[in-house]
Amino acid sequence: MIVLRAEDVWKRYDDTIVLRGVSLNLKKGETKVIMGPSGAGKTTFLKCLNLLVKPDKGRIWIDGEEITSPKADITRLRQKIGFVFQELNLFHHLTAIGNVMIGLTKVKGMSKSDALKKAKETLKRVHIEEELWRKYPAQLSGGQKQRVAIARALAMDPIVMLYDEPTSALDPGLSSEVLLVIKELSERGITSLIVTHELGFAYEVADEIVVMNRGRIIGGGSPEELRNAKNDEVRNLLNKWNGLKDGVLV
Ligand SMILES: Nc1ncnc2c1ncn2[C@@H]1O[C@H](COP(=O)(O)OP(=O)(O)OP(=O)(O)O)[C@@H](O)[C@H]1O
Ligand SMILES: [Mg+2]
């Protein structure tokens, strides 16, 4: 079952065409990784998926409903997508648990006690232990903050999780704890679309890796297929990433 479908998505800013007909499907339980150089259009594409950025052309379906339809209930459909951004984006005036609860009470209309229970369960899923629940973002490490941000999105029971370079603002030591959580969630069946520059992680977690350049998807395949990529443009791009020599993971 396809839970997210994008068909021929185009976007331009002034004179620059940023997306040139991007299409992508995500099946329930699947994990796809988007890789590509800076400026390729990866963030713009993710933002188009829940209409944070409005595409100029193209159609997008979430869970079988078209969010790009003029009749779409965009607010309701957006709730089906969990979004974890590149930059850390917690509410500074709320504790870790408060950050996870707020969407549950304000958006989902849950009672405080139900939201508290759900927030605790979700924080445990991302390995944020009880002693951190009442801390404010300023008192947490970058990796802890990003895991709280994941919990906040996950607690809303989205149909798909989108991650936009979730570790790029973190020191290497802290990014591994975040990547581990994303991998665990993916392995437990959370449908995920992940933009990352971490090639080793992409090979570990992805069912399929999609390579984007200059607003287009220029190739893709399973990690196995990409290791042996024939397409020169894909090979050249992949060769630029660390840990790769001649398209082979070393
Ligand atoms: N709001 C905007 N107004 C004008 N141009 C924009 C805007 N947002 C993005 N762009 C341009 O669109 C292009 C694609 O940007 P985007 O952020 O999608 O790239 P990216 O692949 O996510 O790159 P990175 O790996 O650096 O995050 C860039 O050239 C960028 O300058
Ligand atoms: Mg980006």
Image: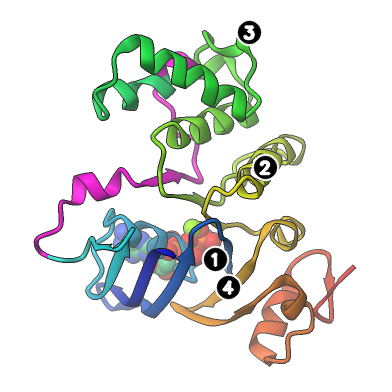
The amino acid type, in three-letter code, at marker 3 is Glu
Q: Is residue 69 above or below residue 139?
A: below
Q: Residue at x 69, y 60 (%)?
A: 202
- Ligand 1 sits in quadrant: bottom left
Residue 93 visible from this viewpoint = no
Q: Which residue is mark 1?
A: 38
Q: CA distance from mark 4 to mark 3?
A: 39 Å
Q: CA distance from mark 4 to mark 1?
A: 15 Å
State if disc 1 and disc 4 touch (CB < 8 Å).
no
Q: Position of residue 215 (x, y in %)?
A: 43, 77
Position of the N terminus by quadrant = bottom left
Which quarter of the picture shows residue 182?
A: top right
**Numbered label attached to residue 229:** none
The amino acid type, in three-letter code, at marker 4 is Val
Q: Is mark 1 within 8 Å of ligand 1?
A: yes
Q: Residue at x 61, y 49 (%)?
A: 186
Tell which circle, 2 or 1, labels the residue nearer the N-terminal end.
1
State if disc 2 and disc 3 touch (CB < 8 Å).
no
Q: Which residue is mark 2?
A: 184
Farthest left residue in view? 71
| For discs 3 and 2, the disc positioned in front in the rendered view | 2
Position of the C terminus by quadrant = bottom right
Q: Which residue is mark 3?
A: 131
Q: What range of the chain is rendered magenta?
A: 70-98
The amino acid type, in three-letter code, at marker 2 is Glu
Residue 141 visible from this viewpoint = yes
Q: Is residue 163 above or below residue 14?
A: above
The one nearer the camera, 71 or 141, is 71
Q: CA distance from mark 4 to mark 2?
A: 21 Å
Secondary structure beneath disc 1? Answer: loop
